[in-house]
Image: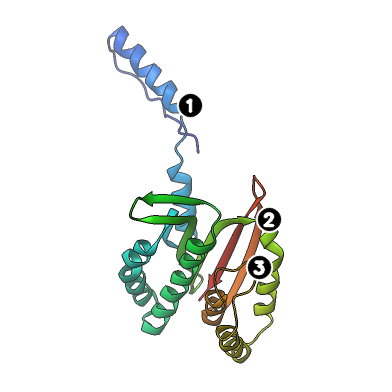
């Protein structure tokens, strides 16, 4: 978004002050304010919280009280607040485990996965949307898993969760995939997107309505 200055009638001033003011206005006119466009979009989308950066357990603990309280305020339903927070936790855990973008927090803090998480409320429902970078080669396996889960009803998801809990982790996975199953079990609906990125990577986005 460009910032435009409304030029009003000027009162008499010194020549040097007028030159400095005009130079300042030209600089502002050619500047770009990033926040207003993000702010408007977030307002339109009913965003409660949005963060892009390293994800670790501290992020989860920091937002637990805020998200649970806001969910109760919006819906008056304590059970729904638990579901919203549970989906948020699983989504952030997926970023922590699987994001290809990594940073070293500190010598003692260990490594963290980098991603983006957004929680909002619109059209009478909460949503949790997360995104992180994955390898292009991981897309087919992940997409196949998501298609499988989309075709299951609640009873099938419950049975599949128990089955996977007793089975070894799939090849290339850092777990049994229970987090993804748990997200779908708690969701009323979900969508996913794979966006080509540079360096042989893709941006994987999972958007869950609750």
Nearer the N terminus, badge 2 or badge 3? 2
Residue drawn at x 50%, y 69% as measured from the top left? 127
Q: Which residue is mark 1?
A: 30
Nearer the N terminus, badge 3 or badge 1? 1
Give how far apart the Cα atoms at labels 1 and 2 are: 39 Å
Residue 25's x, y, as percent? 40, 23
Left/right placement of residue 8 relative to residue 179 reads left
Q: Which mark is residue 175?
A: none
Residue drawn at x 42%, y 29% as measured from the top left? 5
Q: Which mark is residue 136?
A: 2
Nearer the N terminus, badge 1 or badge 2? 1
Q: Nearer the viewer, residue 52 or 72?
A: 52
Between tags 3 and 1, which lies in front? 3
Residue 178's x, y, as percent? 54, 78
Give how far apart the Cα atoms at labels 3 and 1 are: 44 Å
Q: Which residue is mark 3?
A: 142
Helix, strand or loop under label 3: helix
Q: Residues within 10 Å of mark 1 (few under 14, many from 20)?
A: few
Left/right placement of residue 58 relative to residue 118 reads left
Give how far apart the Cα atoms at labels 2 and 3 are: 10 Å
Using the rendered view, name the quadrant where residue 152 is placed.
bottom right
Using the rendered view, name the quadrant where residue 184 is placed.
bottom right
Q: Which residue ends up furthest to the top in the rendered image?
A: 15
Q: Is residue 31 above or below residue 125?
A: above
Residue 95's x, y, as percent? 50, 62
Residue drawn at x 54%, y 62% as measured from the top left? 98
Q: Is residue 117 above or below residue 200?
A: below
Helix, strand or loop under label 1: helix
């Amino acid at each position: 978004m460009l910032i435009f200055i409304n030029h009003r009638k000027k009162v008499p001033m010194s020549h040097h002050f007028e030159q400095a003011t005009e130079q300042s206005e030209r600089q502002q006119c050619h500047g770009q304010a990033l926040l207003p466009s993000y702010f408007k979009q977030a307002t339109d989308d009913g965003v409660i919280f949005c963060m892009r950066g390293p994800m670790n357990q501290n992020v989860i603990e920091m937002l637990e009280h805020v998200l649970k309280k806001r969910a109760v305020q919006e819906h008056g339903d304590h059970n729904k607040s638990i579901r919203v927070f549970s989906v948020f936790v699983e989504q952030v855990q997926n970023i922590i485990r699987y994001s290809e973008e990594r940073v070293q927090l500190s010598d003692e803090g260990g490594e963290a996965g980098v991603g983006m998480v957004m929680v909002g409320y619109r059209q009478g429902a909460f949503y949790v949307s997360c995104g992180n970078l994955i390898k292009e080669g991981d897309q087919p396996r992940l997409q196949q898993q998501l298609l499988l889960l989309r075709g299951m009803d609640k009873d099938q998801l419950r049975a599949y969760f128990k089955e996977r809990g007793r089975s070894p982790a799939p090849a290339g996975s850092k777990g049994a995939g229970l987090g993804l199953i748990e997200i779908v079990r708690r969701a009323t609906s979900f969508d996913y997107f794979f966006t080509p990125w540079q360096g042989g990577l893709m941006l994987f986005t999972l958007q869950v309505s609750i």
